[in-house]
Structure formats: structure tokens, C-alpha cells
């Protein structure tokens, strides 16, 4: 959980529960929390239930991949044909040309970095969601030196931005 101002929320973007920290305190002096804040309800007729394995290993990691693809497509200097989604039958997740740089990206959203190390990615750029930033140091130590560049989504976006500026 993360506190920003009077808002308490989980950093995992797919968790929508948010709470408000009030000015009131309990007998022990801890601030009182109200919530969860109302969220948009979805009608059951428009909802499907996925098998847990599909949800856990495809849908949840795919959310971050698709979000990054959307961000890349919005960047001035990256044309739609400069982005390849799941190239070579998903050997990695994204190939993108930004200026004179080509980035092959494998986005890894898994709880355990050892799973990534056990099956090393095929792409040079290993990117983890920002909420898994703690994995970056371990992956840098554990994956073969010189073969991979490991960073968070935010750091990868910064790298792409620099490549686009250099191309101008």
C-alpha cells in the first residue's frame, strides 16, 4: 500500500481499492481510514471469468505490455510501423525503432525474479513494471553480464525518450 496525500492505495495498477486517510485519530493515535472509495461497477452480463492460469500468466502481464505499446505509439518520432508486437511468435514482446535505435523488449511481470533467470529472455531489454522495481538489481546480478539491460517501464520510457531526442 502507498500513501499520497490523503489517499491510500495499492501500487499495483489493477487493484482499484482506494481509501481516504482522515484527520481523525483512534485511541492509539493512528489516523482513521475511510473507504474503500466508490468505484465504477460493471454489469455482470458484460463480465467474463477467465481460468486462473489465463488471468495470471497472460492477462495480467499483458496489461502492462499493451499499455507500453500504447505509450510507444503516442510518441512523436515513432511511426506505427516502427512497433512490432510479439515478434517471431512472441519470442519477446515488443520491437521498436526510436530514431536510429532498435529496442527488443521482453516485459516480465512475475512475482519471482528466479523464474525469469531460470528461463532467460531472448530480448536484450528486460523490462519490469514499476511496481516490481525491487527486481531490477537482482536480475542485473543474476542474468548473464553484458547480455541484458534490465530496467523498469519508467526507466525504459526515459531511454526511448533519449533515443528520440538524439534522432532530432
Image (cartoon, rainbow, N blue to C red):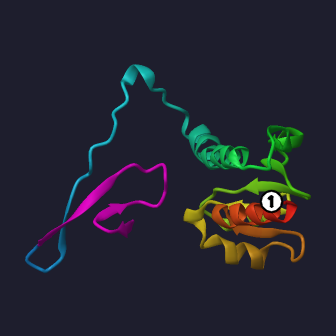
Image location (x, y in percent) of residue 86: 80, 42
Residue 96 against residue 85 in the figure, above or below: below
Q: Is residue 135 inside the magenta stretch?
A: no
Q: Which residue appears farthest toward the left when viewing the image?
A: 27
Residue 106 against residue 44 in the figure, above or below: below
Q: Identify the residue under disc 1.
A: 164
Instruction: State left or right for residue 7 relative to residue 167.
Output: left
Instruction: State left or right for residue 160 relative to residue 58.
Output: right
Count of residue discs: 1
The quadrant in which residue 146 appears is bottom right
| The residue stretch that appears in magenta | 1-25
Residue, x 34% and y 36% (percent of image)? 40
Residue, x 92% and y 58% (percent of image)? 100
Residue, x 27% and y 49% (percent of image)? 37
Residue, x 59% and y 61% (percent of image)? 111
Quadrant into which the C terminus falls: bottom right
Amino acid at each position: 500500500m502507498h500513501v499520497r496525500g490523503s489517499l491510500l492505495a495499492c501500487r499495483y495498477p489493477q487493484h482499484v481499492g482506494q481509501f481516504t486517510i482522515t484527520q481523525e485519530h483512534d485511541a492509539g493515535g493512528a489516523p482513521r481510514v475511510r473507504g474503500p472509495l466508490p468505484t465504477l461497477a460493471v454489469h455482470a452480463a458484460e463480465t467474463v471469468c477467465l481460468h486462473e492460469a489465463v488471468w495470471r500468466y497472460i492477462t495480467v502481464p499483458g496489461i502492462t505490455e499493451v499499455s507500453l505499446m500504447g505509450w510507444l505509439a503516442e510518441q512523436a518520432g515513432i511511426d506505427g510501423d516502427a512497433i512490432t508486437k510479439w515478434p517471431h511468435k512472441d519470442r519477446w514482446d515488443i520491437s521498436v525503432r526510436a530514431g536510429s535505435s532498435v529496442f527488443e523488449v521482453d516485459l516480465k511481470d512475475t512475482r519471482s525474479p528466479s523464474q525469469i533467470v531460470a528461463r532467460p529472455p531472448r530480448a536484450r531489454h528486460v523490462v519490469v513494471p514499476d511496481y516490481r522495481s525491487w527486481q531490477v538489481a537482482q536480475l542485473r546480478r543474476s542474468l548473464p553480464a553484458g547480455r541484458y539491460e534490465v530496467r523498469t517501464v519508467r526507466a525504459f520510457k526515459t531511454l526511448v525518450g533519449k533515443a528520440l531526442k538524439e534522432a532530432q
